[in-house]
Image (tube, rainbow, N blue to C red):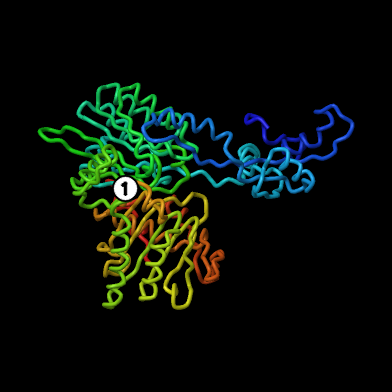
Amino acid sequence: MPEGLEKFIKLPSKKTRFVSMETALLISLKKIFQCDRVLDKGVFRPIRNSELELGGEGEDLFLVFQKAIFERRRQEVIRIDFDENISSHLIKFINKKLNYKDVNTYKLPIPINLSSIESIFLKDFKKLFFPKFKVRFPERIKDFKSDYFKAITNKDIVIHHPFESFEVVTQFIDQAADDPKVLSIKHTLYRTTDDSPIETSLVRAAQKGKLVTVIIELQARFDEERNLKWAKELELAGAQVIFGNINMKTHAKITLVTRKQMNSVINYAHYGTGNYHPRNAKIYMDLSYFTCDKTLTNDAAKMFNYLTSYSEPTTIKKVVYSPITARNKLNELIRNEITNAGKNKPSGIVCKCNSLVDKQIIDEFYKASQKNVKIELLIRGICSLIPGKENLSENIVVKSIIGRFLEHTRIYCFYNGHKFPHKKNILFISSADLMQRNLDRRVETFIPIENETVHEQILNQILIASMTDNTNSWQMLSNGNYQRKEISSKEKKFSSHNFFIKNPSLSGRGSAKLKSRAKSNLKI
């Protein structure tokens, strides 16, 4: 089946009807092969190992990855999907002829490539789509006539995607590329698009003679080829391109702009919880944090020194990072909540991330629960912790929010001896999930949120809205299964996604910040 072939054929009829290309081919085999009889037929798809086999040390990484991407097409088959009507005889025949041994096999309804269904929805079922909403552009940027440096100097800003435009990120870097006062731009690239406006701006900045340094992660699975393309373009423009450590993925999302102002040099930093990916930013829920705080920007500069020299930084003051300090800091914060519970102080933890599978962190959560620490976990994907177990996890609640947007934000909050929400709760946003790979084998950042307005927005708007959500929420039971949250007749329906669509953020409100401030804060 060629990649460019239509996956569905629309049938002529008053009603909307489609037939899959697989079905059309199966019923046309006699004509295709010019034969009188078909002995057997079916559809199958081999799935290959996607891990790249890399060369040894000292080799040119660019060439190593080019070769590995090409060879991926011939990697070992680890799974085969068959259509549900295929015969067992044909399955054995295919496995024998193609030499597929000890491979997992699955029978699935046609189409076996489920993502192809999207092509139907885009054409004929628009009524099933969510209504469009208007993406907000932060008033605070408009107040400063789109001068990002003045706006950030005035106050730290956090942007909540996709409800607030990702153009804030692209325009910030675009302005830095053209500003004659900007001396350098440093940037980490994990995933992006072929036509990325950010990378285009960085190419232009390098061509203008600015010092541009880009840490490109070549091991971003299935984006390796795209990242190689950008590496080549950036190098040709004069940028310094660094591929990072072959044994440790760079997953942190940081941009650092150095600008000469009057008689001093000022740093501006962007920290993100998601990728620099304009298309994903339309459906992924993420946070972009802009600051010129001296400590946070100095820490960003030291992170880039770490990424370009591999020497462990010793003077990072606020930013917590993997694989050096993050695990110990998380353990320390969890144990501090246990200490507070023992002193009858308010104690609790709220975590919002994609996955929780790290055994050590899970054990720490269990210990905290046994000491009466209240723990609420908003885990969108895989969660290996089981809540509600007697004498183990009675004080832990796990829920997953599945709705219109992909929950991708990583937020970590610790009560710190104060009720929740409180301005003295310890709060971090991060690029990392609670997985061993994120804590031990990747470069990740945990950014402390201390600015009052940003802290209030993330706690009182984003976290509480997510905790209050009862229309998109699935709660994990003590047997490990999930159950959709039941809404009683007395309970009011609340969708966190609809709330974010309708309510402007505190951070981005600018001169309109007093309007509807009360209704933009929730209480639990």
Where residue 294 sits, quadrant-wise, is top left
* Residue sitting at x 46%, y 53%: 497
Percent across and percent down for residue 466 are 43, 59
Vertical placement of residue 69 versus 478, above or below: above
Question: Is 188 positioned to the left or the right of 257 in the image?
Answer: right
Vertical placement of residue 394 versus 475, above or below: below
Q: SS for tag 1?
A: strand
In the image, 161 versus 280, the foreground residue is 280
View extreme (left): residue: 263
* Residue sitting at x 51%, y 65%: 475
Percent across and percent down for residue 91 are 75, 45
Percent across and percent down for residue 438 are 39, 51
In the image, 105 versus 12, the foreground residue is 105
- Which residue in the protein does label 1 denote? 158
Q: For the image shown, how many numbered marks are present on the structure? A: 1
In the image, 444 versus 25, the foreground residue is 444
Q: Amino acid at mark 1?
A: Val
